[in-house]
Every structure is written in C-alpha cells, then in structure tokens.
Amino acid sequence: MLEQSYVYHEIQEQPQVVARLLERERVAIEQLAAAIRQRSIEYVVIAARGTSDNTGRYAQYLLGAVNGLVVALAAPSLFTIYRQPPRFGRCLVLGISQSGKSPDVVSVLSEARRQGTLTAAITNDPASELAQQADHVINLQAGEERAVAATKTYTCQLAAIAMLSVALAENQPMLSTLLGIPEVMAATLAAHRDIGQQVQRYRYMQQCVVIGRGYNYGSAYELALKLKELTYTLVEPYSSADFLHGPLALIEPGFPVIVIAPSGAALAEMRGFLQTLRQHQAEIVAISDDEQILAVADTPLRLPRTVPEWISPLSAILPGQLFAVHLAEARGHDPDRPRALRKVTETR
C-alpha cells in the first residue's frame, strides 16, 4: 500500500522536519547572515543539482526581492570538465545538496575556498565532503531520507533559504510568518487526503507541462521533476511568460497543464494565463487558494491557507508531491524504487 512507502511517509513528515530545522538551525543561519554582512557580500553563486537546483531558483527570487542580492546558479562543468573556473570576487558560494557527495558540486566550493571566497553548505549530512569545504554549514535536520525521490529535504532546503533571507533582513513579522509555516503545511497535507481519487483521471496521461511564476517558478521545476521520477511522464516546466513565447503551440484540446498559482503579486497574470489556456481547451490542474483560479480548473487542488507569496513554495509544492506519488501508484509503479535511479547521484 502507498501509505507504507518511504516516500509517502516522508511527504507526511515534512511539517515536523521543517519545524525542527527552524528551531535547531536558527543560530547557524544567523551566523551565516552576520558573515554576509561583515564581508559586504554583493551576490550569491549556488552550486546544486536536481532538486537542490530548484531550491536555487527559489533563492534567486527570495534573496533578490527581499535582500537585494543577485543570485546565480553555478555551472559545475567549468570546474570539473573544462577546468576553467570563474573568479568569484565578493560573493557567497553556497552549495546545496541533500547528500553532500556529488563531486561537481563539491568542486565548486573547493575552488571558492581556494580563492578565499565565503562558502556555505546546506546539506542533510554535516560530515559530508561538501560540508568540509564550507565555512558555514546548515544541517537540514531532516533525518534519513530513504526514498529516492527527495521530498522532505527539498522543503527543508526551502525553509533554510527562507530563514537566511529573514535573518539578513532582520524582519520580525517575516520571522513570525516563517515559524508558522509548519502548521500551514500540516493543514495542506490534511486537505488532500483524498487526492488519490482525483489523480485517477490522469492515469493514462503521457505528457504535460507545469507552470509557475516568480517565487513558484522553482516549484514548477520541482513538480515536473517528481512527475518524471515517479510516474515516467514526459513533463516540462515553464514560467507562464516563457510558455507564451512559443510552447503555447503545444496546447490542443485536452492537453494537461498543471498550474501553481497561490495568491500574490503574480496572481493577476496567472489568472489571465489560465483564461488563455481555457480558450485553447487545455486540461487544467490548478494548485491555488484563489477562487477564480480554482473555478477555471478541471481539477482544482485547493491550498487551504493563504500565506505571503514569498513563503508559499513550502506549502504549494505539497499537493504536487501527493499528486505525483498517487499517480505512480495508480500506474502500478513502486514509488520507492523508480527505475534507473539511485538515492545519491554523483556527477562530475
């Protein structure tokens, strides 16, 4: 049964592990924030792969909007294959990896340390190779993640980035909101206990796209990745803006589009985007707390709590995770053993 799988259990565990991270790593994150201020850091380079890359996409928006920092994703091949690393200058080089073992991610921090650049690691293994190259280590506190598909380490990574942003901003209202997010996550999971029934409609879906914008651009990438890993569906993520620049031609009657659209500054644009999808007769799955968005959807996945947009990725991804794991079960796949994949992938 699905409820006995590692991945399902770890999805349900997320409110507790995020709460643990926020409690135990606050001091370490505040120390990193102090180092960023002390060294007058002007931008951030993030080294990551897979799910952790999607955390980096969230960081681009959050650290940019709240803290005024330019955030770029590293190109690890410059360090490992071409052996022509760029000069980092006055930046923070941040490695994000649940295992901390991928040689290409480690190599980015190793070079940054050689250049005398401030380094930090966000990892679930504080004794890992990645952590050893970091001046500051943030332990995800997620406990062992036994499922191949990352879920609880992803939301812990998001929470770590959010707490770093809050610490840099020294914003008490934002901190209060962040500390309340585990309760919001728990309510979101509880609201979708019956999602398995809705998923049956998509049992034979062969391809789809996932759309997000702004803070939830990374959420679109993460949900697309989970659908690929667990259900073997051909899925592509886009921002709603990019989708209109060509990929809209994909849409024909019944083509599935999953839209992540919680309340916030991007909502008005997303409402208009859904009307465009409806005009082209797309099959719409909507993850949202907005009544207009949910009313347009063929399959509405309601977010039961409205939160500020900057923190919404922690709750908005949860219905998507459940959608993916239930679709895997509906197709007869073992969600704990996706074909051709291992828990730790080491790339160079």
Image (cartoon, helix red, strand yellow):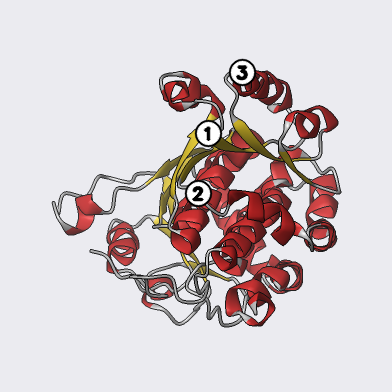
Contact flag, marks 1 and 2 (Cβ < 8 Å): no
Q: In this view, does 240 lie above or below 310?
A: above
Residue pointed to by mark 1: 255
**Residue 280 percent coordinates (x, y):** 57, 19
Q: Which of marks 1 and 2 is in front?
A: 1
**How crowded is the residue under tag 1: few (<14 C-alpha within 10 Å), some, or many (20+)?**
some
Q: In this view, does 290 lie above or below 19?
A: above
Q: Nearer the viewer, mark 2 or mark 3?
A: 3
Give how far apart the Cα atoms at labels 1 and 2 are. Answer: 15 Å
Q: Which amino acid does label 2 sit on?
A: Ala
Residue pointed to by mark 3: 276
Give how far apart the Cα atoms at labels 2 and 3 are. Answer: 21 Å
Q: What residue type is labelled 3?
A: Thr
Secondary structure of the residue carrying tag 1 is loop
- Mark nearer the N terminus (2 vs 3): 2
Contact flag, marks 2 and 3 (Cβ < 8 Å): no
Q: Is residue 63 left or right of residue 301?
A: left
Q: Which of the labelled discs sits on residue 224, or is there none?
A: 2
- Mark nearer the N terminus (1 vs 2): 2
**Residue 74 percent coordinates (x, y):** 35, 48
**Residue 137 percent coordinates (x, y):** 52, 70
Q: Which of marks 1 and 3 is in front?
A: 1
Q: Is residue 125 left or right of residue 151?
A: left
Res 52 visible: no
**How crowded is the residue under tag 3: few (<14 C-alpha within 10 Å), some, or many (20+)?**
some
- Mark nearer the N terminus (1 vs 3): 1
